[in-house]
């Protein structure tokens, strides 16, 4: 297998340093990338949509969107692209890399946490205006519930409303009836999820050995 | 503590003495009875190596209870012959009641002990309850020993394994946080299987080594197999002890679930090892063939897998059965207890791992069963399980203490005891460290050093080990007495010493504690989102990791299992739904708690939401409260599924009303049904009585009605039309249409003239009942109008009821007010409920009442009650009115007129003509509503009628939950 990718090995090395994946992991990801893209260099949305396992995932579109979101490429760019290269693919994936928490300072940990939360936040903040508005939030909830059939819409609305109120009451405190809470900012987002140990939760185990996909 | 113990001692002595007497007494009729006990003793699983006389109360108790009938017959006949037919007025029937009596006394002692322990907050925070119980057991055991010279009571293995342990395991399994459990299943399994094997073999071999070296005395006879056997039984961490201690320590949930899960699952290993070694000991080490070792391994697999399978089968069965219990809610809990217990027994029957079976049955069925059964059943199951488990635990610990006192079974060997203590501790620690090191390669969240310390230290041994060691056959295992003594010491040491010190240790090590906060809805949403995101990323990365499989499982569950095992009505609810509801309940409660003022958050304007209450079906307060079973409010009898359907709402209304309205009468004709806790067939009767009263009521109603002068009349009729709108209509006749409530009010003028209603009512059913009830009261109460105090009070209530407006919350309240204990609750809760901004309105209404009412004197004393009635209404304005504040202003004045009624009634002599004209009330309606009513008129009446209750309900639901709950909850409350 190594021979197959011998050419881009240097490239992998760079990527490995950039993303923290081991070269082996990158190789595996590369193989997967090729598999998804039908041996092409770029991935399109359709390629994602064709993943059979993804078909039942209620928030499929949001996740796929996240892969094409420039904000997740760690390049301070905004907007979305039509196709992503392998590098971008790996960079997005690296958000889900498990991080060794043992020897991490509080500061690093906090940074990691912000990073991961930022990813989530961007996912929900579809129009990139820095806030998750009620509409956007409702959309999320709706998709989450989309597998539940009929009650989806109505309930989603109710839940999103309730959740939004909760955010408002947590972050802003008491509000006057006239006050208007327009959306969740990233700071608020951090605040409401402060009890979730995202740094320990938001990761998956990437295979190390090459025959993972055998 | 100190001054209480004598009390307990007395109780214990009493029991002992009674038991002594009992044994003597039972000797006399023995010839007759004796045929039975030996047989049952042999049959009972408890019939261990014990000679029967050593058998304490428990054994005999078991045997006795099995054939409770036979002794009855025999003693009766014996007595008869004894006294030659002479009739004794009072007889001493101790032998008859002995067994249940002693059991009851023991449970009583155990429970009282618990109460006493918790008198002193300081003691229980420092000393775990299990320690106190063991100490108490020691004392009681000593007393019994002194009193009877012989240890009568002992923790009997049969009793323990068949009754005490299942209750605890059942509780643990059923309420196991399954997500947490399965997330950590791998770790738990490693600890449970590898860890236990490691502990067992290491301890066994080391002890044998010590024996060879000579540190353990020669008297302790035993070869390697005996020591391995002992190692097996002593190495298992005990679920009872772990639960008892860790529940008080509150370590973080991951740590807890690992330790606790291990203690549950290692049962299988222990049982297999124990059995294998016993058989090896029995055949003799020399005769063990290689094949036997393989058989041991095979049996290990079979016991585990078999136990789990049995549990899962029963789980499916149970879930499936509860799907169909809709009409027999009352036995729902029974099904759960029975099937879960049967899972245990069945596993035991095939000598599979019963604990595993029960645990997995509980875990497996929980989700579906909880969704299927009613809220009441849920509460019942929860409380019953907790009660049983708690009692069982208490008894286990007390009996452990008592058993320890019995010197006759002890044989002390310092070497053995100290070596065992050291080894189990050392090997536990080593095992934990080694396994954690390996596991941390795989765990996403590694276990750090502190966790490992707590885990090693939390390896408590308990009653399982004791029961197992007592079960040993003294003839085959020569060192049994030594083992018993050592086990007891080990248990005491781990439970007492480690149990006592683990709390300070946890504090000192700063082990992350469990945060007891419930998830906020946002957290929940994001957690759910995580699951999906992670699964998706795994899919995209082409990995088949944990999330991938969990996602697959959830899909499978959703598509097949849930469909099969859940009621249709609940099946469609998403997972988020539950959280959402819970959170809403919490909100609702906090709203109530904080005096309704918190509504500020609800009144917050969000772009798309008119108000929180706009999604009334989903969010309405009672539903949540009901769901939650909180103490505040709950008409529990209602359908447990919150459904938006009109039909359900109606039934709900109906339930609500039958539950509440007929209360006063119900007091007289006590209602009892074994099968339904709710009003069942009684309704018919009620309706009859009700109808009989109706006419008279109507009369009085009309008379009062028509005496009212022009403006009032108008107002009243208007009020009738639109229940809550009445509020908004100011005394000055403000426009009624402008209020938001009106829009939501489906049937503005359906029920107008009482006459029509009465006719309808005759052939109508439930819904009619509602309206009539209101009237009934009115009439009932009106005659005593002039009477002072309490009567007046009721008059006021009835007056409030008069306007037939469907949405008036007060209507329902009067009846509630009639209930015995109710008023208190109502007043208490309602005071809380009323939003501050409505206070003013309330005060206004009160003042207007005072000024208007001719006998204002009475108004004051009744104040609390009246308030109880009217407040909810005001509160409703805040809760359900869209504008919240907007209609709150209108509330106060509107209430004024309502309180006028008494005066009007007082003033007017009844004029028949007006009564006659009553049917024409419809004509007197204000212009706007009449059209509606006329079109709906006769043809559509039934539907409108049906619809009204919904409105009622809504208002009730949003406004008066506290009022409605206490009443209906009363019986079920614990």
Image (cartoon, coloured by chain):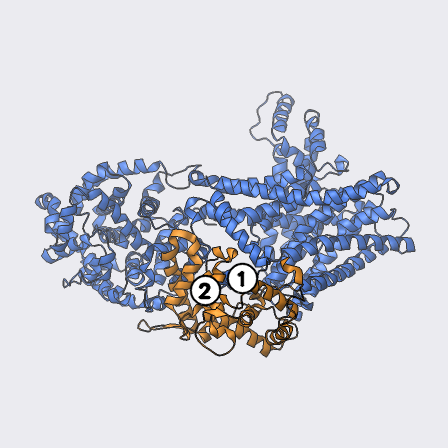
Chain colours: A orange, B blue
* 10 Å crowding of disc 2: few (<14), some (14-19), many (20+): some
* Pick the front one: B595 or B207: B207
User: Which element carries disc 2, helix, strand or loop?
Assistant: helix
Can you see residue B913?
yes
x then y, percent, for residue B470 = 76, 44
Can you see residue B108?
no
Seen in the picture, residue B193 relative to A116 is either above or below; the reply is above
Q: Residue at x 12, y 52 (%)?
A: B925
Q: Chain of mark 2?
A: A
x then y, percent, for residue A208 = 66, 65
Q: Is residue B342 left or right of residue B450?
A: left
Q: Chain of mark 1?
A: A
* Pick the front one: A201 or B796: A201
* Pick the front one: B770 or A85: A85
In the figure, residue B317 lies in which quadrant? top right
Quarter placement of the N terminus of chain A: bottom right
Residue indicated by mark 2: A62
Residue indicated by mark 1: A38
Q: Is residue B473 left or right of residue A100?
A: right
Q: Is residue A113 left or right of residue B79?
A: left
x then y, percent, for residue A186 = 45, 74
Q: CA distance from mark 2 to mark 1?
A: 23 Å
* Mark 2 or mark 1, earlier in chain: 1
* 10 Å crowding of disc 1: few (<14), some (14-19), many (20+): few
């Amino acid at each position: 297998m190594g021979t197959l990718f011998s050419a881009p090995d240097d490239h992998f090395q760079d990527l490995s340093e950039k993303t923290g994946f081991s070269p082996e992991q990158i190789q595996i990801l590369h193989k997967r990338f090729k598999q998804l893209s039908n041996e092409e260099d770029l991935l399109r949305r359709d390629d994602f949509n064709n993943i059979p396992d993804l078909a039942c995932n209620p928030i499929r579109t949001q996740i796929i969107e996240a892969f094409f979101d420039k904000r997740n490429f760690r390049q301070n760019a905004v907007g979305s692209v039509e196709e992503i290269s392998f590098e971008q693919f790996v960079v997005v994936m690296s958000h889900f890399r498990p991080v060794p928490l043992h020897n991490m300072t509080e500061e690093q940990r906090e940074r990691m946490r912000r990073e991961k939360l930022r990813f989530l936040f961007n996912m929900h903040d579809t129009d990139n205006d820095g806030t998750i508005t009620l509409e956007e939030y409702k959309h999320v909830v709706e998709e989450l519930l989309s597998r539940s059939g009929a009650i989806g819409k109505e309930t989603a609305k109710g839940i999103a409303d309730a959740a939004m109120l909760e955010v408002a009451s947590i972050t802003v405190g008491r509000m006057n009836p006239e006050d208007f809470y327009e959306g969740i900012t990233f700071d608020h987002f951090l605040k409401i999820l402060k009890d979730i140990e995202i740094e320990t939760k938001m990761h998956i185990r990437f295979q190390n050995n090459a025959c993972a996909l055998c | 503590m100190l001054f209480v113990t004598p009390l307990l001692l007395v109780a214990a002595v009493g029991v002992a003495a009674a038991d002594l007497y009992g044994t003597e007494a039972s000797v006399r009729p023995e010839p007759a009875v004796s045929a039975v006990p030996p047989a049952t003793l042999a049959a009972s699983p408890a019939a261990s190596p014990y000679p029967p006389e050593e058998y304490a109360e428990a054994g005999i108790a078991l045997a006795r209870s099995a054939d409770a009938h036979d002794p009855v017959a025999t003693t009766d006949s014996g007595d008869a012959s004894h006294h030659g037919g002479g009739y004794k007025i009072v007889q001493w029937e101790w032998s008859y009641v002995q067994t249940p009596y002693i059991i009851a006394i023991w449970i009583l002692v155990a429970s009282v002990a618990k109460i006493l322990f918790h008198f002193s907050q300081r003691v229980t925070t420092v000393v775990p309850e299990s320690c106190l119980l063991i100490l108490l057991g020691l004392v009681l055991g000593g007393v019994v020993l002194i009193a009877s010279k012989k240890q009568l009571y002992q923790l009997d293995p049969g009793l323990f394994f068949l009754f005490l342990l299942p209750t605890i395991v059942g509780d643990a399994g059923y309420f196991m946080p399954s997500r947490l459990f399965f997330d950590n299943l791998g770790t738990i399994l490693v600890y449970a299987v590898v860890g236990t094997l490691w502990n067992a073999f290491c301890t066994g071999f080391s002890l044998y080594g010590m024996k060879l070296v000579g540190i353990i005395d020669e008297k302790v006879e035993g070869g390697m197999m005996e020591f391995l056997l002992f190692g097996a039984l002593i190495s298992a961490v005990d679920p009872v002890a772990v639960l008892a201690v860790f529940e008080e320590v509150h370590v973080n949930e991951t740590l807890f679930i690992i330790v606790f899960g291990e203690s549950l699952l290692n049962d299988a290993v222990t049982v297999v090892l124990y059995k294998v070694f016993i058989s090896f000991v029995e055949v003799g080490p020399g005769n063990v063939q290689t094949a036997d070792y393989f058989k041991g391994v095979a049996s290990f697999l079979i016991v585990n897998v078999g136990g789990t399978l049995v549990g899962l089968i029963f789980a499916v069965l149970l879930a499936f059965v509860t799907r169909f219990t809709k009409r027999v809610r009352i036995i729902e809990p029974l099904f759960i207890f029975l099937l879960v217990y049967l899972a245990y027994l069945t596993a035991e029957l095939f000598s599979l791992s019963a604990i595993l079976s029960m645990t997995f049955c509980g875990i497996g069925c929980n989700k579906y069963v909880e969704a299927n059964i009613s809220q009441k059943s849920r509460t019942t199951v929860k409380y019953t399980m907790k009660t049983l488990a708690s009692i069982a635990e208490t008894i286990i610990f007390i009996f452990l203490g008592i058993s320890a006192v019995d010197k006759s079974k002890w044989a002390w060997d310092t070497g053995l005891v100290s070596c065992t203590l050291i080894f189990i501790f050392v090997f536990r620690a080593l095992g934990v460290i080694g396994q954690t090191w390996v596991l941390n390669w795989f765990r996403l969240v590694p276990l750090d050093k502190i966790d490992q310390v707590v885990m090693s230290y939390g390896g408590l041994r308990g009653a399982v080990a004791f029961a197992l060691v007592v079960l040993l056959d003294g003839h085959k295992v020569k060192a049994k007495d030594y083992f018993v003594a050592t086990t007891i010491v080990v248990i005491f040491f781990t439970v007492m010493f480690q149990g006592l010190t683990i709390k300070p240790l946890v504090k000192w090590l700063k082990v992350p504690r469990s945060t007891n906060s419930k998830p906020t809805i946002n957290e929940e949403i994001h957690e759910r989102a995580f699951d999906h995101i992670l699964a998706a990323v795994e899919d995209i990365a082409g990995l088949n990791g944990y999330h991938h499989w969990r996602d697959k499982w959830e899909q499978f569950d959703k598509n097949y299992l849930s469909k099969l095992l859940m009621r249709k009505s609940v099946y469609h609810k998403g997972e988020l739904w539950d959280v959402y509801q819970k959170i809403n309940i919490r909100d609702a409660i906090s709203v109530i708690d904080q005096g309704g003022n918190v509504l500020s958050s609800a009144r917050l304007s969000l772009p798309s939401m008119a108000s929180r209450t706009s999604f009334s079906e989903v969010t309405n307060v009672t539903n949540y409260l009901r769901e939650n079973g909180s103490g505040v409010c709950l008409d529990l009898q209602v359908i447990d599924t919150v459904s938006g359907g009109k039909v359900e709402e109606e039934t709900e209304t109906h339930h609500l009303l039958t539950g509440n309205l007929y209360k006063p009468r119900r007091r007289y004709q006590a209602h009892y049904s074994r099968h339904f806790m709710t009003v069942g067939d009684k309704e018919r009767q009620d309706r009859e009585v009700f109808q009989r009263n109706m006419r008279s009521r109507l009369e009085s109603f009309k008379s009062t009605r028509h005496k009212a002068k022009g403006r009032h009349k108008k107002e009243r009729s208007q009020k009738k039309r639109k229940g809550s709108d009445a509020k908004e209509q100011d005394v000055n006749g403000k426009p009624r249409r402008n209020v938001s409530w009106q829009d939501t009010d489906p049937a503005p003028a359906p029920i107008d003239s009482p006459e029509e209603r009465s006719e309808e009512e005759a052939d109508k059913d439930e819904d009619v009942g509602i309206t009539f009830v209101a009237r009934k009261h009115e009439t009932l109460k009106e005659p005593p109008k002039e009477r002072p105090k309490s009567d007046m009070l009721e008059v006021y209530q009835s007056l409030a009821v008069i306007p037939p407006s469907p949405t008036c919350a007060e209507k329902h309240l009067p009846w509630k007010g009639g209930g015995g204990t109710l008023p208190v609750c109502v007043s208490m809760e309602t005071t809380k409920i009323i939003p501050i901004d409505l206070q003013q309105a309330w005060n206004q209404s009160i003042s207007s009442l005072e000024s208007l009412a001719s006998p204002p004197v009475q108004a004051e004393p009744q104040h609390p009650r009246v308030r109880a009635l009217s407040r909810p209404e005001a509160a409703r304005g805040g809760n359900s009115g869209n504008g919240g504040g907007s209609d709150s202003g209108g509330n106060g004045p509107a209430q004024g007129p309502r309180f006028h009624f008494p005066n009007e009634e007082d003033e007017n002599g009844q004029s028949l003509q007006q009564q006659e004209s009553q049917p024409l009330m419809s004509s007197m309606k204000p212009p706007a509503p009449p059209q509606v009513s006329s079109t709906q008129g006769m043809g559509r009446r039934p539907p409108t009628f049906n619809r009204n209750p919904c409105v009622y309900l809504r208002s009730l639901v949003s406004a008066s939950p506290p009022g409605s709950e206490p009443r209906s909850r009363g019986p079920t409350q614990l």
